[in-house]
Every structure is written in C-alpha cells, then in structure tokens.
Image (cartoon, rainbow, N blue to C red):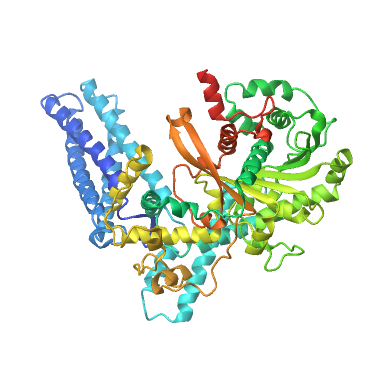
Amino acid sequence: MPGLQLFGRRWAIASDDLVFPGAFELLVRVIWWIGVLVLYSVHKGHFDCLGGALLQSYFIVLLVMLGAVICCMSSIVYISMQGTISNPGPRKCMPKLVYIRLALYIPEFAWAIMGAIWVSDNGVQCDKTVVHVILLTVIASWLIMLFTTIAIVIVFDPLGRKKALYYVRDEDHNLESSQSDQLLYNFKKTATRVWETRIRLLCCCIGNDNDNRVAFSSIAQLLTSYFADTDLVPSDIAAGLTLLHQEQDKVELSRDPDEVLSQSPSHPVRDDLEVELGKAAHYMQFAAAAYGWPLYVYSNPVTGLCKLCGECCQSRRAQHDIVGGDNLNCHFGSILQTTGLQYRDFIHISFHNRIYEIPFFVALDHKTEAILVAIRGTLSLEDVLTDLSADCENLHTDGVDGDCFSHKGICQAASYIYRRLINDGILNQAFTVAPEYKLVIVGHSLGAGAASVLAVQLRSSFPTLKCYAFSPPGGLFSKALADYSKNFIISIIVGKDLVPRLSLPNMEDLKNRILRMVVNCNRPKYQILLHGCWYEIFGGNPDDFPTELDGRNMASLTQPLLAEQTLLVQKSSSYNTLTDGSSPESPRYPHLYLPGKIIHIIEDSRSGWLCFSDVKYNARWSKETAFSSIYISPRMITDHMPDIVLSALRSLCQERSGCGPCQTPPHVLRTNQDNDAAAGE
C-alpha cells in the first residue's frame, strides 16, 4: 500500500507483496543454477562432440543469466521485506528493481528459443543426459514465463491508469477544486463501468433483460462507492483482517462475563426461550428443505442419492401445483424426505428463480397446525445479485411511526412472493383446506430476509401469523420496522455468523477498522501474513504485534486516526471521518437492523476435531446492538450453513426436557454431524 506504480499505471499489488513469490522463484533459481553448474562441471571436458560448442555456450550464458536473475530477485525480496504496510519509503527503489527483472526476461526468452532449437536439432550428437537437462531447462524457462504472464494478468487493474492520473494530479496542490472534482467524477464513472462489465461477465449465463441490467448497474454503483475511496491492494485487506481477528480475539478473552450477559434483554423469560427454541428446531427443517436436493445430498453424502432415486423417477406435476425447474422431481423428493410430509400436504411449490424472484413452497404442517410458507435462501447467481441489491426501498406499513424502508433486493423478492400468495389465491386455497390453522413463514439467509418482509406485508391481513428467520441478513429493516417486527418475528443466529452482521454501515466500519489496523501495526506485511496463517490453521494465542494503539479494547479501533493521505482518496467521506475525527453529518448508508426478537446460539464447548467434534451450545435472548460490527472468525461462514443451524437447534433441544416440538419426524434432513455419529455406531 499504495499500489505499485509501473508503466504509468497503478497495479493491484504493493511493493511489499513480492516477498513470497520472490522467495519462491529465488529458491527455484538457486536450485536450478546449482544443478546446471554441477552438470557443467561434470561434463566440462566432454563438449568435443558434434554440436558440443553450442551446448557449452548455452550452459555458460545460462549460468550468467541465472546468476543475474538470482542477484536481482535477492534484491527484490530484501527490499520488499523493508518498511511497513503504511510506510513504503524504504521500498521506493522497488519499481527500478522490477524494471530490471522484467528486462532480464528478454534474454531469457531469446535463450529459451535458442535452446529449444538446439535440442531439437538432430545433428547434435552429444551425451543424451546433457541434451535432456537442456530440454528440462528450456521447459522450466517457458513455465516460469507462463506463470509470470498469468501473475501480470491477475494483478492488472483496469483502473490503474485512471488511479495514477488522479493521484498524481491530486498531489499537485495547484489544481482548482473544480478540476479535482471532475477528475474524481471521471474516475468513479470509469470504475462503475468496470464493475458493471465484471458483473456482466460473471453472470453471462443468466440473461440480460431489463431487470438484470438494472441490478447490474445498481450493484456496480454500490461496489464503486465502497472501494473507490481506498488505495488498498488485496494483500493489505488480508493483513488487516488477520490483525483485526487477533485483536478481536484478545478483546473477547479479556471481556468480563457480566458484560456479555448485560447485552441480553431482560424482558423475555426463560420459558419463552425454551418454547421458541422448540418451535425453531421444528420449523428449521422446512427452511432447510426449501434448498432442495443440493443441501439434502450435501447433508447425506452416503445415502442421499439413493433415497432420492425413487422419488426422482415419479412424475407428480399433474398431482401438485409445481412451478418451474424440477423436471426430475429431485427437489420435490428431497423436500419430502426432509420434512417428512405427505404428498397431499403441499399446496404450492415454486422452483422458479430469477433476480428478485426466489423459490418457495406452501404446505400444511399438521403437527403444529400451521400453514407453512418456506422460502429458499441463496443458491444461485440470481440470488447473489438479489442479495447485493442493497439500496433502500420504502416499505409502507400501516400503524408504524417513523421511516419504513428495507433492503431493496429482499423487499422486491418478498413482494414477488406476496403477489403469488395473494393474487394467485394460494393462501386462500390453503385456508380453504385448513381454515383453523395459523400462518407461519420461515426461511434461512436470503429466505429469512424475504420471510421477514413478507410477514410485515401480511401482518395486517393475518394478525396471528408468526415468522421464524434463521440467520437473516443484518441490513434489513429500518429501526421503526425492526421494533414493530418484534411482536411476530423471531430471528435465530448461530455463533459468529457473518450474514446477520452484514450491512452497508457495518461494511464501512470494517473497512475503517482494517485501515486503522494496517496503519498502526509497525511490522512488515510478510510477518503479519505468516503469523496470521499459522494462527488461523493451528490456533494458539493471538500475536501481540507492537502497534501504536494505546490499550486493548474495541473502542480504540473506532477512534479517529490521522492516516497517510495515500491510503484514502482525499475527497472521500471515509477519509474525512478518519482524519478530522468527526462523524459525517449524514451517514453514507442508512442504518438497517435485524428483524424481530433475536435468539443467539453460542458455542459453549467443543471436543474432538473437524467433522468428529462434539459441540455444546447455549442460547440466550440478545439485542440487535450485539451484531453492530463484523466479527472475523474461521467460523463466520460455517456458522451460517443451514445444516449447522439445524444441528445446533437439535442439540439444544436434546439437552432440554419437555421440548415436544423438537421431536424429529422420520426421514428428515440429517446433518453432517448426525451422519458422522451414525457412522461411528
């Protein structure tokens, strides 16, 4: 940091990123040089064969070139190890060294061509061992040049020339304010176009209709606004994340248990928690079932395919209201296996999937006397684009005072399901079959967010409805809607799950925390990454890297910091907030909150290792403020997986007596931990 500037453009690599790739190439080159030197010494007097003079010349020139490359790479590695992330001064000569190293590729390329010609010449009658070694040398040269080309493509930044132009002119204090603003406008416009092109290429298989184009443009603008004001390269972010993870772990280890308990609201009684956990464990089966056969096979790797074979061979499209995308009945078969319901219990099943249109099913749950609407979570590129459409959209709700707005993509997905349920008469059909049943809406991840919005939309028509949102996205409701939803929505979150902590303000806060960590740490990046990898894989105590932070508390990470101007574009609100210590008059992103009352399931203890570990959980009511920042952890993704959520709920129910709804019907989804236990028996 900042990005290395070469050939008049910035690259997605910093001058301190060349330690590991340089050391690897240096090791290869040294071994290569020693091998060639030994071979040349052994055969020094045996080059009197036909073509031997050419081969001797090849060896001599190769040894000289390898020696020059080794010297250059040694210098690059040494210089790259100097300084810190935010202090690139000791590495200011790095561009010259890189130019020298790239120049050495020219004779190496020419010599590789000549070596290939000499080896392929049938007139050469020298020792076959020497010829074969030269052939390996030629192949190695071509492989190194190939990997170098691939690396150049990877670190190429399409915005590099614009960045170089902007930073160079921005450092010129003679620029008029209007000129600087115009440069920034042009830069962001180009960045938006680049992000939109990337998204189109990534999602080329999903079509290019009007809704998709609007989503692409909206997401591109969001990504531009988030990344445009920083001069961080990917390795800076990785170093910042590992530093932040260790800092957060130190804070957690030193936290007073009474402080943790104080974050739990006091009004819900323990009996309510027991009841809600029992219901949640039961309804989570339906939220998991909505994922169809991929989750079922993943959770039942040994028997899943066999159990689905019989279901997939049957045709039930005429018997049930099934819409889209399940020609082999594999999704429906997995839903039957997971929920334990009968064919006649399903009212409507939709596997139709587009941007803002996600699959769901409506079924009768006779055990709890409920009409269940289960909504699928993220499982496709279309779902990812729905997740990333994170602008705010008005969600007018009668009887709610204050601003009512929600996550745009999730709100539109919920509106699509609302239209299907009401306008197509699906709920009327369900209540005609079971008029005394109550309405329950469930979902996981994206499905949990859509279920929560749908519950708000249906609340006025169905006052007794309940919603169970498993691992819902954090940036969902405005404060007024979040408070209103506490009357009928229960959110269940496991451990250090990332998704309930994801919101635009939290992401902005994470970016600022990363900046503060990398600027304050006075260790080289390669040391940070080496220890970070060891810590993430093998655990141990968090490293106590010397920093300029006074004290070890999370509040210190949120204090203003006067960072170098190279870290942030000077015109950005993030930079102004960091440097002047003031909070912006109007935040860049509005604060959105989790829906409903929150049950937080945390890990009490873990024994064993990996899949064979035995985990004990505990549950408590929690406040939305407990999820106001992103927690870096190896389990931030795994704790979000639906099979882990279901396993945690079942484990809690098994530890508690009188939890009737937790009893599992036959042939339901088994988690990986269940399968491992069964295999052990």
Q: How many marks?
A: 0
Residue 628 seen by the camera = yes
Is residue 68 toward the left or the right of residue 493 in the image? left
Is residue 54 toward the left or the right of residue 239 in the image? left
For image coordinates 41% across by 80% down, the residue present is: 175
Residue situated furthest top in the rendering? 681
| Residue closer to the observer: 323 or 255 | 255
Horizontal and vertical percent for residue 269?
61, 49
| Residue closer to the observer: 333 or 346 | 346
**Image quadrant where residue 512 sits:** bottom left
Residue situated furthest left in the rendering? 45
Is residue 157 toward the left or the right of residue 211 in the image? left
**Image quadrant where residue 659 sits:** top right
For image coordinates 30% across by 52% down, the residue present is: 525
For image coordinates 56% across by 25% down, the residue present is: 675
Q: Is residue 625 above or below residue 41?
A: below
Horizontal and vertical percent for residue 160?
42, 60
| Residue closer to the observer: 552 or 133 | 552
Horizontal and vertical percent for residue 609?
42, 30
Residue 205 seen by the camera = no
Q: Is residue 668 above or below residue 109?
A: above
Q: Is residue 38 above or below residue 25?
A: above
Is residue 257 toward the left or the right of residue 390 in the image? left
**Image quadrant where residue 563 sits:** bottom left
Horizontal and vertical percent for residue 673?
53, 29
| Quarter of the rendering occupied by the N terminus | bottom left
